[in-house]
């Protein structure tokens, strides 16, 4: 019975992750899931494939397939596109234009990878507002064509697009899937060492929290087939390691945190020397908990939340990576209707439905529309488009 309950809970969690972790990043307010689609998601999870020791031709979340794009990257490097179909040629053209705009002569492989990461997390972020670009089909949300053309992608789309860019740049790269088969990301090799990079998880924030992680960092939020995929033991090209700020006095951390919050930074990377002890770490943990408590009670910061990871860096000491996320991001930007807007709304609805319509917006999460019909006043509450 315990095992059955565990499986049911796992399925429910997988559905939630399918919707939130591996779902589309270009979602309009009209695409809210219905009960039928949720049921379909559950069916896919219940029938999902068992983890397989391979990279390509793997189905994620029961629907999205990791496919090779080496035909496109090979054509880019050779200059011969004769073997590509029209869709592949268009994909190559879009990808080439991106690289032309972000890659400069003399860049190291790390700098090239970082440029691609920054472009993808900045340009392929969650569309805000009602005017999102939605393709006529979701068939391409798991491959570079859909990602580059529509900015509409699931995690598989991000992972395969990033891999395509890396292959075009001659940087070894693999697409990794988690053991529960609902998420995917990448591994890149720099100077002979492998690193995990999860573009999807950083999309929109670009805070580098999931950029070039070693196995220790990655394992805090991911699980994968460590027997098949190579070990990621490097730290040299981890973004946090490269950009860490050394802390001389641990009691400076609250002030550093406040400065990061005021600057709206998405992450902090703090370094501690080899003299840093377990007792010091316990003090820092207590401070971080205190900061979180203050933030929760603050009118300015209550919508923010933080998470952190400790990473040993050998004889150099430790790296503390702190991510800062904003619950309020996304959705439709607020727009205050003008008197002209309201007059036009009232007139057009009144004429179309032969009623005396008066527009009113309350301060809550819904709009109330009042109208007179046959001498009676009625109130219709419509869910606010911002969701």
Image: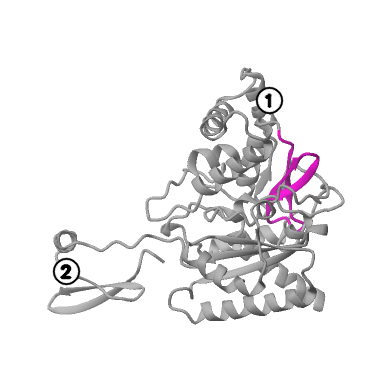
Give the residue drawn at x 49%, y 45%: 123
| Boundaries of the magenta span | 171-197
Q: Is residue 310 magenta?
A: no
State left or right for residue 220 relative to residue 103.
Answer: right
State the mark number for residue 331. Answer: none
Give the residue at mark 1: 74
Answer yes or no: is residue 40 visible: no
In what quadrant of the picture does the N terminus appear? bottom right
Q: Secondary structure at mark 2?
A: strand
Q: Quadrant of residue 385?
A: bottom left
Among numbered discs 2 and 1, the one appearing first in the sequence: 1
Q: Main secondary structure of the magenta part?
A: strand
Residue 304 % position (x, y):
51, 70
Give the residue drawn at x 33%, y 63%: 334
Answer yes or no: is residue 122 visible: yes
Give the residue at mark 2: 357
Residue 120 % position (x, y):
55, 45
State left or right for residue 202 relative to residue 299.
Answer: right
Mark 2, Cα crowd under 10 Å, few <14 / some 14-19 / many 20+, is many
Q: CA distance from mark 2 to mark 1?
A: 62 Å
- Farthest front residue? 248
In what quadrant of the picture does the C terminus appear? bottom left
């Amino acid at each position: 019975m315990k095992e059955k309950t565990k499986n049911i809970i796992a399925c429910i969690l997988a559905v939630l992750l399918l919707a939130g972790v591996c779902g589309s990043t270009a979602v309009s307010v009209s695409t809210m899931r219905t009960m039928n689609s949720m049921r379909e998601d559950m069916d896919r999870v219940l029938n999902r494939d068992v983890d397989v020791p391979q990279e390509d031709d793997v189905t994620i979340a029961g629907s999205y397939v990791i496919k090779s794009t080496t035909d496109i990257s090979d054509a880019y490097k050779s200059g011969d596109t004769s073997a590509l179909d029209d869709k592949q040629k268009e994909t190559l053209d879009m990808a080439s234009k991106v690289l032309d705009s972000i890659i400069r002569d003399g860049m190291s492989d790390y700098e090239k990878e970082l440029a691609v990461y920054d472009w993808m997390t900045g340009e392929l972020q969650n569309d805000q507002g009602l005017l999102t670009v939605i393709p006529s089909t979701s068939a391409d949300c798991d491959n570079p064509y859909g990602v580059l053309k529509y900015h509409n992608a699931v995690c598989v789309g991000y992972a395969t697009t990033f891999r395509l860019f890396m292959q075009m740049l001659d940087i070894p790269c693999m697409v990794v899937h988690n053991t529960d088969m609902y998420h995917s990301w990448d591994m890149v090799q720099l100077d002979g060492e492998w690193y995990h990079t999860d573009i999807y998880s950083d999309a929109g924030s670009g805070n580098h929290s999931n950029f070039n992680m070693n196995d220790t960092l990655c394992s805090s939020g991911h699980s994968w087939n460590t027997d098949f995929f190579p070990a990621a033991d490097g730290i040299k090209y981890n973004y946090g390691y490269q950009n860490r700020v050394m802390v001389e006095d641990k009691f400076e951390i609250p002030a550093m945190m406040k400065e990061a919050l005021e600057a709206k930074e998405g992450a902090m990377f703090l370094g501690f020397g080899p003299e840093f002890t377990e007792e010091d770490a316990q003090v820092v943990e207590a401070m971080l908990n205190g900061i979180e408590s203050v933030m929760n009670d603050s009118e300015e910061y209550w919508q923010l939340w933080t998470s952190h990871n400790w990473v040993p860096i050998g004889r150099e000491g430790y790296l503390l990576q702190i991510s800062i996320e904003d619950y309020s991001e996304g959705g439709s930007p607020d727009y205050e209707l003008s008197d002209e807007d309201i007059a036009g709304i009232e007139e057009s609805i009144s004429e179309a439905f032969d009623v005396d319509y008066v527009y009113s917006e309350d301060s809550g999460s819904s709009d109330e529309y009042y109208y007179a019909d046959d001498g009676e006043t009625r109130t219709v509450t419509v869910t606010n488009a911002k969701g």
